[in-house]
Amino acid sequence: MKRLKRRTFLKGLGAGISGILASRTMPYFFVRNIAQAAEGDTIKVGILHSLSGTIAIIETSLHNAELLAIEEINAKGGVLGKKLEPVIEDPQSMVQVFAEKAKKLLLADKVVAVLGCYTSASRQAVLPIFEQYNGVLLYPTLYEAQECSKNCFYTGAVPSQQLDNFIPWIINTLGRKKFYLIGANYIYPKETNREVKALLRKHGGQLVAEEYAPLGATEFSTSINKIASSGCDVVFSDLVGDQIVAFYKQYREYGITAKDIPICSPITTEQEIAAMGSENAVGHYTSFDYFQSVDAPENKSFVERYKARYGRNAVTNAVMQSAYFATYMLAHAIEKVKSTDPDALIFEGLPGQEVQAPEGKVKIDEKNHHTWLWGRIGRANEQGQFDIVWKSENWIQPQPWVPYLYPGKACDFTDPRVLKRLKRPWSEEKNRSGTINL
Amino acid sequence: MFTQSIITQFFNGFSVVAILIIAAVGLAIIFGVAGVINMAHGEFMMIGAYVAAVVDKLGGNTLLAIPVSFAVVGALGLLVERSIIRWIYHRPLETLLATWGVGIILQTIVKLIFGPELYYVGTPKFLAGGFRLIGRLPFPWYRLFLIIVAAALMALVFYVIFHTDLGLQVRAVRRNRAIASCLGIDTARVDMTIFVFGSGLAGVAGAVLAPIKSVSTTMGFPYAVDSYMVLVLGGVGNLWGVVAGASLIGEAETILSFVFNNVIGELLVFLFIVIVIRIVPKGIFGYYERR
């Protein structure tokens, strides 16, 4: 009897504590969502970014950027006279949870589209679900490309947009020819380095060494010794996450400066620099479509609004900017087709959609679901920001299959062969890719 | 050229060994004496690193962060021991699960307070730069500092275990808990003190590693894994085991990573550990009870 009582008591206590925790820690938007849903007549948009677990660091910022865009759209009167209602799910940095939550958003919440995912692994986990149930996914991350799905729109950069100008610039303007490639040991760095190597061959650069560190490894004294004794004059780094911080810190610790051997990266953002301290990043280069320091009125007002909303110390970066303008693209696409039907959005609303983003005017390609973005090269300065040392004259075409590595392959959703295939129901034809052989 | 680089690597290896010792020593005495498999060890280090970040923000440096982290994480260890661990000593599976849970709770609490982003901790000014040893690269002063810290921590632990009354009791409890208890040693108090001491050392580890690594809520786990490898290889319950395990893993990893590459290096080290454990299951300096 006593045992039973104690258990009941503990249960009650547990429920009470979790209730208190929920009310204390659950972000306010849950509460607001209920209020909005009560008004009825909203358009539901899924937001699928990890708010806990290992990738939460970056994904929380994407989540924030998307919510900011939704708030702004709603403040201007919403879409088709209705408010956008964010339906937020936390996939906890676990690939299988991404899949479950994506299914839930599509089937139970019936969202018009989902803004979500960061890693390639998570995107690849949810894509089959979006394809099966004909959902719309807007994916904001720069990634290794070589993919195009009917149900996905990619608003981040593909490697060619970051590298096609960066590598020749390093060789010709910086005058550095001997490359040491260091990256994390998984798909994105390996595929990116494939393109780097192809570009080196094309532009007369020289590959000194190529090295991969296990994911999560943060001890780089060995790699740095190798770099110093290799005779290279530039390091190309596609290390990710915590590794970036540890690598740059230890690089300077061992007395190598940006004057001796600069580090060039397609992935180091303002956020990592804030974490490593600007003294460890000064003089190193990054290539991106967007930097917080972009000198444009749209960007200044974006940074201002972001800081006003999330605190003075908040930093903006390229990926969250992509997430931000993707939200606007979705809203404009719904306005354009005056419907929330996925096929209307996929075939008419989103392709060719243009917005004035913080980085400049950007557009979803009419054919391949990727995005026309700007090219910029930044040199880290003492304030932890990037001085933009080069900017493309025009926006750059997205190429999911670059011709110098994959001649004869392309992605084209306007091709009659592809259209014919996509018209057939999923149960008969599971291939939803737009890739064709030329 | 190659030989020179290998020699440089050998010295680099010392700093990696030092990092492993610093990370593992707190765990070694908790695991070795109190018999608790502390899965929250990495999170204790993480909290030590965040304490260092706060000290850094308030204008202090690593030297100040060391005692502050020891105190804060030691106090945390006391709290965890008194509220949870003391009820489940000598039930290894339960302590494993409970401390795993404690680790998750600590991560979440830190994230609620500090937010999910990475934190910055600077290197103290007088330890910036390095000195020329051999080859092209200078050896960083901070790495030398880490080696000194590792030696000092080992010396401190050796002193406590072999030259204090507490150490005498600890050794007695380690040898035979029941007899020690019969002889009037308050074994529960010994366990508690050791847990607090070990936690404090984990805090120090976090504080001194923060300037060269990244500080985030999830930083702890890889260190915990490394520390367990050191203990398993070196042997639980013998302090020399920590030194031996860390030296073998640290030097092997740096040399092999240099000769081959990081991935192969790590793989060979794991393979090496498996083979050693097959031959001496309790580790190189493993403690064999008399039967």
Image (cartoon, rainbow, N blue to C red):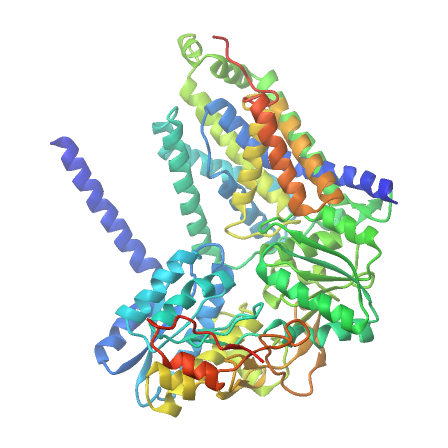
Residue A266 picture quarter: bottom right
Q: Nearer the viewer, residue B265 or B236?
A: B265
Above or below A335: residue B18: above
- Residue A197: x and y in percent read 72, 65
Quarter of the C terminus of chain A within the rendering: bottom right
- Residue B2: x and y in percent read 85, 43
Q: Nearer the viewer, residue B131 or A324?
A: A324
Q: Is residue B92 left or right of residue A200?
A: left
Q: Nearer the viewer, residue A311 or A46?
A: A46
Above or below B71: residue B54: below
Above or below A87: residue B227: above
Q: Is residue A328 visible in this depiction of the protein?
A: no
Q: Is residue B81 visible in this depiction of the protein?
A: yes
Residue A181 picture quarter: bottom right
Q: Is residue A359 left or right of residue B261?
A: left
- Residue B192: x and y in percent read 44, 26
